[in-house]
Image (cartoon, rainbow, N blue to C red):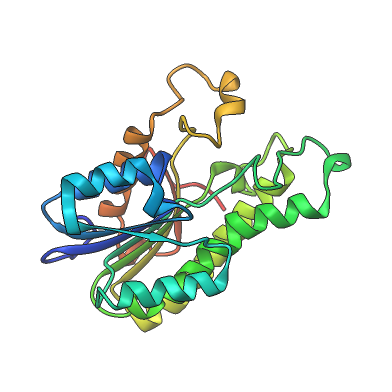
Amino acid sequence: MALIPDLSGSASALICGASQGIGLALCEQLLQREDVAQVFAVSRQATTSAELAALAERHGPRLVRLDCDARDEQALQRLAGAVAADCAHLHLVISTLGILHQDGARPEKGLAQLDLSSLQASFATNAFAPVLLLKHLLPLLRKQPATFAALSARVGSIGDNRLGGWYSYRASKAALNQLLRTASIELKRLNPAATVLALHPGTTDTRLSQPFQGNVPAGKLFDPDFAARCLLELIGEHGPAQTGSFWAWDGQAIPW
């Protein structure tokens, strides 16, 4: 299967949130592909990550590690400049950015637990950072086939919300979905071969889910390698005709 639909030749890919969990697994799997020429691994500590360093030892210049705090727009601007100096076009960008219970965010069970700082922290990472990443990388996505995918979450679906709770996380992921849907319309005008996707990887054994894994049904806690494989399959199967859509790891469409 092609990395993205209608791709001919070798691809350049960028993973934001690359130093751990699903992001790291995506880097590993992309570097194993013969149709991927280069992977830009982006995270706050990409150049000091032992895991990314090990990948760099195995794959040499095919892996480019770049430090960037995606919540800092000036840092994103510098990132885009650094990538553009080394790459004329990005065929695939995946944002794995997301927080639930760190950097000031927390999963509130009720209205009484809401506070402004937690809401702001959730929105800054879960909604604002991915769309600002897209904004600054847009010049590298304006020709040839290109896919921008961001990890959303089923709990960000308004139509699927039957349990309540997790106010900040739910709302920030719902905001991300709307931002991606809106961006897909603009990007389609600029590049008809472009695709924007919101993807739910399922509950994955990462730092984000660790405090809540006791409530996960048997067989529904995925390892990062499995989640990454599912995401790449989704990306390979969904092109411009499905731009602006929201999909789960198992190929099922998720209601907005």
Q: Nearer the viewer, residue 218 or 52?
A: 52
Q: Nearer the viewer, residue 132 or 62?
A: 62
Residue 172, horizontal then vertical, whole percent: 65, 54
Spot the residue most to the right: 112
Asked whether, in this view, residue 90 is left or right of residue 124, the answer is left
What is the tally of numbered marks visible in this picture?
0
Q: Is residue 229 above or below residue 87?
A: above
The image quadrant that residue 49 belongs to is: top left
Residue 157, horizontal then vertical, whole percent: 60, 48
Q: Is residue 31 above or below residue 138?
A: above
Q: Residue at x 25, y 45 (%)?
A: 55
Residue 206, horizontal then vertical, whole percent: 48, 33
The image quadrant that residue 87 belongs to is: bottom left
Q: Residue at x 54, y 74 (%)?
A: 74
Residue 185 visible in the picture: no
Spot the residue most to the front: 48
Residue 36, horizontal then vertical, whole percent: 17, 57
Spot the residue most to the top: 218
Residue 140 visible in the picture: yes
Q: Is residue 191 above or below residue 239?
A: below
Asked whether, in this view, residue 225 is left or right of residue 58, the answer is right
